[in-house]
């Protein structure tokens, strides 16, 4: 077992050897993730087990955990999103092989002999993120501000007579 997460690995050899990778992977090594998170100094906890299953399929199983700071799309303040992803990936050499994988596996199509660990972890984290990050309405500053605005508007409506009421009285002669 390793506490260091390597940049790349030959997944076929790792599967044949039953290699385990466990450690922390800095967000700084995941360029696409840096474009969406506010905590660039964050890390992901990675636990990956490489093996060959009973059908002879090289695979990677494990878990990725991280706490990401994203921008709420309601109030534009940062919010913490804990992400835990369980992975079960079948390592294949082509799209045709990927189509034949059992349902328990998501495919990792190899283009060469090396698998970039940070890229694989980054893909899994990005897939787990909400499409539109938002606080729960009770926790969102924008939602609270909107409620206050509506409450004040309701109070103003209740205290102010209808401006056309005077015209209605003139029309009816009352």
Image: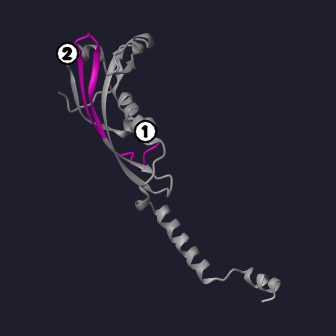
**Residue 119 numbered mark, or none:** none
Q: Nearer the viewer, residue 135 or 147?
A: 147
Is residue 43 shown in magenta? Answer: yes
Q: In this view, does 135 lie to the left or right of 117?
A: right
How many labels sit on residues?
A: 2
**Residue 17 numbered mark, or none:** 2
Task: Locate residue 158, reporting x and y percent.
Answer: 59, 80
Residue drawn at x 19%, y 29% as measured from the top left: 2
Q: Which of 31 and 132 is in front in this view?
A: 132
Q: Is the magenta stretch mostly helix, strand or loop?
A: strand
Q: Is residue 50 left or right of residue 81?
A: left
Q: Which residue was labeled with disc 1?
A: 33
Residue drawn at x 43%, y 43% as measured from the top left: 130
Query: Please, what secondary structure does the residue beneath circle 1 have?
Result: helix
Residue 42: tell me if it is visible. no
Q: Which of 26 and 94 is in front in this view?
A: 94
């Amino acid at each position: 077992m390793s506490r260091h997460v390597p940049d790349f690995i030959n997944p076929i050899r790792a599967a044949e050897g039953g290699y385990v990778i466990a450690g922390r992977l800095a967000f700084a090594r995941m360029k696409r993730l840096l474009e969406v998170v506010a905590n660039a100094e964050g890390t992901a906890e990675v636990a990956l087990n490489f093996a060959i299953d009973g059908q002879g399929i090289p695979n990677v199983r494990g878990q990725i955990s991280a706490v990401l700071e994203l921008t709420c799309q309601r109030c534009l303040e940062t919010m913490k999103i804990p992400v835990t992803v369980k992975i079960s990936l079948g390592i294949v050499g082509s799209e045709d092989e990927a189509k034949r994988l059992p349902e328990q596996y998501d495919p990792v199509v190899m283009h060469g002999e090396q698998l970039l660990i940070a890229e694989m972890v980054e893909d899994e984290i990005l897939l787990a993120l909400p499409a539109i990050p938002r606080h729960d309405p009770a926790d969102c500053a924008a939602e609270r501000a909107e409620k206050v605005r509506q409450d004040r508007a309701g109070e103003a409506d209740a205290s102010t007579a209808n401006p056309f009421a005077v015209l209605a009285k003139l029309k009816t002669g009352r």
